[in-house]
Amino acid sequence: MSNKNQSQSVLHWMASERLYEEYLFFYLLIIVFWGFVGLFSFGFELSGYSFQQNLLFNFIWFLILAITMAFTPFWYRLVFGRKARLLRRSKEIRQQIAAIEDPIKREEIKQHIANDGGLAPRILQKWSLIFLGWCALFEMFFVTSWVKDLALVWQPEWVNSVIDWVRANTNVPPLNVDRKLFLVKLSSDDSGSAMLKQMFGNEQVFLTSAFGRACLLYHAWHVLSFFPILIASIICLWQLIGWTGTNQLETKRGIGGYCLLVVITFFMTLMFIGGLFMFIQDVGYRAGSVTGLAGWVHDLWLNIAYFFIILALRLYTNWFLIFKNMLIRH
């Protein structure tokens, strides 16, 4: 078979389907399954043991579920078999790519197929998805096992240090005159702040309460995990967002096209800023999650802010390419 025919045969796979999306879909189903196991099992209490001892038992259960998530590829093979369609198609594509004799052309075609989602996720992409599952699992463990009756059941010295640091860097209204990193404002319109307003009346009472300490620690978790979660989400979603058409925005021409792109970018910038405010600055925004599992599930949709942040970063990348192409042409 000639190189030309070999190349056309492989490129046919590229145009026919995206294995990357299918892999992520099934892997996500497996991770969600183990997440539901944690959802309905975390917070258990064994009679005769203290809250702290039960917290340890729940933490051990968390580690077990985290390990089971790490074996997501194994569970896929176990459920669907080694001859599952995705595994079979991936093997066929690898064989066709390997059959191309020209090494330069082989790598080019492999890259083309990978860019269009024709290959299975890379190891880094698989582990990024698993890492996101671990983060969700830890939050379920936190709100069901570490927090009981709106208070932390275990507060070692290092936890107290984290809480004290967040409180020391949290400003209360009317203005952030001290330019502190965090802010709590119970007069905000979001559901978390409204709930805190009803429970405590003012910010100072909230910050010194047992529930306030739990919220401060939960907020510290969100601040520390923000960039790792964002990076993992970018690794998993960057290509998917590009396939929706955003990777073609830099090719728009004409005043109308650029004006539309400006409007979209402005809107996504507002979403970007709002996401940063929610995850990093506002201590009370997600306080409802700390009330228990029902509150955490209710606030789960707020994580869509990660998607808007990534979409905004993708648009900024497109603007960079637009200006780069303009400079090259001139």
Image (tube, grey):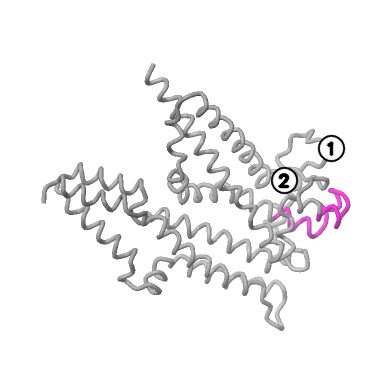
Relative image position of residue 103 (x, y in whole percent): 18, 45
Type of the residue with mark 2: Asp
> What's the magenta bit mostly, secondary-structure-wise?
helix
- Residue at disc 1, secondary structure: loop
Q: Nearer the viewer, residue 283 or 301?
A: 301
Residue visible at 49% across and 65% down in the picture = 29
Q: Nearer the viewer, residue 57 or 113?
A: 113
Q: Furthest residue to the bottom?
A: 48
Are there few (<14), some (14-19), or many (20+) residues within 10 Å of tag 2?
many
Looking at the image, residue 237 sits to the left or right of residue 176; the answer is left
Residue 213 falls within the magenta-colored stretch: yes
Q: Which residue range is magenta in the image? A: 195-217
Q: Viewed as shown, does residue 68 lie left or right of 283?
A: left
CA distance separating discs 2 and 1: 14 Å
| Residue 282: image tag | 2
Mark sitting earlier along the chain (2/1):
1
Residue at 37 percent across and 51 percent down: it is 117
Q: Tag 2, which secondary structure?
A: loop
In the rendered image of this protein, does residue 327 appear above or below residue 5? above
Image quadrant in which you'd find residue 262: top right
Name the residue located 79 percent from the left edge and 33 percent from the top edge. Answer: 177
Pointer 1 residue: 174
Residue found farthest to the left: 1
**Mark carried by residue 45:** none
From this view, report whether residue 185 is shown above or below residue 37: above
Residue at the outermost right position: 201
Please identify the quadrant where the C terminus is shown: top left
Considering only vertical position in the picture, is 283 above or below 65? above
Q: Is residue 280 left or right of residue 33?
A: right
Side of 245 relative to 83 (left or right): right
Residue 290 in the image: state x and y as whole percent: 72, 60
Q: Is residue 157 magenta?
A: no
